Image (spheres, grey):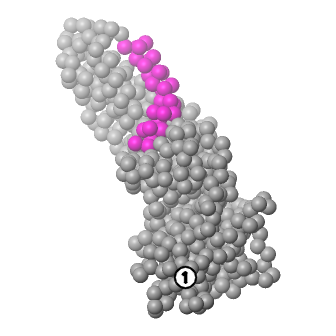
Amino acid sequence: MSQRMRLDGVGRRYGMRGPWVLRDVQLDVPVGALLRIEGANGSGKSTLLRLLAGIDRPTAGRITGCPRTAYVPERFPAALPFTAAGYLTHLGRIHGLRTPEASRCAAEWLERFGAAGHAHTPLAELSKGTSQKVAVAQALLAEPELLVLDEAWTGLDRAARGILDRVVAERVADGGTVVFVDHDPRRLAGAADSVYRVAEGLLLPRDGGTEERQAAPVGPRVVIEAEGPPGGVPGSAAHLPGAPDIDPGPGGTTRLTVPAAHSDALLRALLTARPPWHIRAVTAAAPPPGTAHEPPDDTSGAAHQATLPTALQDTPYEAPLS
Amino acid sequence: MTALLRYQAALLIRSHRWLPPVIVYAAFLAIGVQTGGPILDAYGFAAAGLLPVAVWLTRVCVTNEPPAARNCAAAAATPGRVHLACVLTAAGAALVLALLGAAFVALLSDPHANDHQVAVPVLPATGAGLLTGLSCLLPGVATGALCNWPVLRRPGWGVPAGLAAAVLLLVLGGSPANAALKGMITGSEHGTITAPWLPFAAAFLAAAGATAAACALSSRRG
C-alpha cells in the first residue's frame, strides 16, 4: 500500500432523503493491520465495508489512499455461467494477473480450501459452502493490499474456517491490511489489532487494541519455544506476526506467545529470518484462569482442536460440501 | 479493462441471453429485407431494427451479473469500470449484429434506387448504411444505459421505459436515429447517397454522455 488509507468525515445514505446509515466516520487504516468491525444487524457494518472496498462512494466526506482491494461477500450465490476455475481465472485477470498466473493461483487456492475437486463444476451447481470458498479464493488470488471480509466465514466448513483464519494472519504478516466482520465473537479472537463498533450510524473504537489484548487475552494462544542467534529477538516484537509476548524460556530459549491464528505466520517469520531461528517446541498456551475457552464450533469434537496450535494441526481437509 | 471486457463478453456468450434479441433481429431482417429490393431502403430498415435490439442487449449486459459477483469485480476494478465494461460489451454485441445485418443487405439487395433505374454504387451505400446503423445503435445503447440500474432502479420500469424511448427515438424528428433514417429513405427515392456524419456524431456524444452518467452513478447507488 503506497499510502495509508484514511476515512475523513465519511457519511453514507441511500437516496436523496434516506436516513444516514453512517455519519461522520473517522478511521485510519494502518498498513498491515487486522481490523474487526462489530455491530448489530442492520447497524451499517456492511455499508462501512462496501465503502472501504470501494464498491460504494461516500455521500459525505472523503476516502483517500485507496489500495488494491479485494472483497468477499457474505453470500455468494453466483448463478454465473462459468466453472469455478473459469470464474477464478477471469477474476484473477481483473485483479491484474496474467492468464497463466491467474489459472495457476485459482487452482492453488481451490486446493488449499479443499475444493480442487470442484474446479470444473459449474458455479450454479456448487453447494453454498463451496460457492463461498470460490468467493474467498477470488479475493486471495492476487494478494490484495486490502482484504475486506463481510462475514466471509459464513457457510464454510470447519476446516475451511480454520484455513481462512490462517490466511488472514498470513496476509497481515505479509504487510496486507484485513478488515473483517463476523458475528462469532471468537473469530480471530485476540488477533485483531483494533476493534470498532458500529452503532446508530457512528463508528466507535471498542477497546484499546494491543494493550487491552495483552491484559485480557481471549481465544486460543500458542507458545513457541525458539532458539535465536545470540543477540536475541529479531527486531521488536511489534514487527513479528501477531505481535507476540516475548519471555525468556528454559535453557536460553525465547518463548513467544501469539494468538493461534498467527502461529503459522510467526513460525514462518522465525524460520526465514536471517539468520534463521531454531524452533524447539510449539505448544498450546494454557488458558488463563477464569476464562473458559469455547471451541470455535458447536460440535464437541472440535473442543480439543480449538486449543491445539494451528501449526501442529495436520490441516484436516474435510470432504467439500456438495 | 481488457480483463473486464473479456469477462463480460464471456458472461454474455455463455449466459445465452443474447439469443432472444438476435433471433428477433434475424426475423426482422428476414421479413423486411426482400431479395432485389432497393439497397438504401434496406439499409435504413436494417438500421431501424438495431435501435430496440441495442436497448435490449444493453439491458441484458448490465443486469447479467448477480450483485455479489458484481461487488467482487467492483472491489478489484472500481464499480465505474465494471459498468463501463458491461455497456461496451453490449455495444460490441450490437456492432456485430450491425455488421452481419449489413452483409445480409449487401448480398440480397438490388444496388438501385426505388425506381430500379438509377444505379447506386454498393460500397458507398454500404458505408452510409453502416453509419446509419451506428446512428441507431448508439442511441439504443444510451437508452439501455439510462433505462436500467443504476440510473432507473425501479424493477419493472426498465422494459417499458426502454421500449417507449426506442419508439420515440425512431419516430421523433430531431433524434439522430430519425435523421439518419430519413436520409436513407429520401436517398433511396432519388438514388443519392448521403453519409449521415452529423447524426452519427450526435449519437456518439449522446451515448458517451449517457454511459458516463451511468458509470458515475454505479458507485453511488447501492
* Residue at the spot 39% in from the left edge and 32% down from the top edge: B94
Q: Position of residue A34 (x, y in %)?
A: 57, 72
Q: Position of residue A197 (x, y in %)?
A: 67, 72
Give A172 or A19, whichever is nearer the viewer.
A172
**For residue B97, side relative to residue A259 (left or right):** left
Q: Quadrant of the N terminus of chain A?
A: bottom left
Residue A177 makes an appearance in the image: no
| Image quadrant where residue A253 sits | bottom right
Residue B19 falls within the magenta-colored stretch = yes
Give A249 or A130, whichever is nearer the viewer.
A249
Residue B137 vertical placement versus B31 (above, below): below
* Residue at the spot 69% in from the left edge and 86% down from the top edge: A215
Amino acid beneath label 1: Ala
As drawn, which residue projects farthest toward the front? A251
Residue A138 falls within the magenta-colored stretch = no
Q: Position of residue B190 (x, y in %)?
A: 24, 15
Q: Quadrant of the C terminus of chain A?
A: top right
Q: Which residues are magenta?
A: B6-33
Give B177 or B72, whichever is nearer the viewer.
B72
Indicate the chain on which mark 1 is placed. Answer: A
* Residue at the spot 56% in from the left edge and 39% down from the top edge: A121
Report which residue position mark 1 lands on: A226
SS for dot 1: strand
Give B130 or A151, whichever is nearer the viewer.
A151
| Secondary structure that dominates the magenta span | helix
* Residue at the spot 48% in from the left edge and 38% down from the top edge: B11
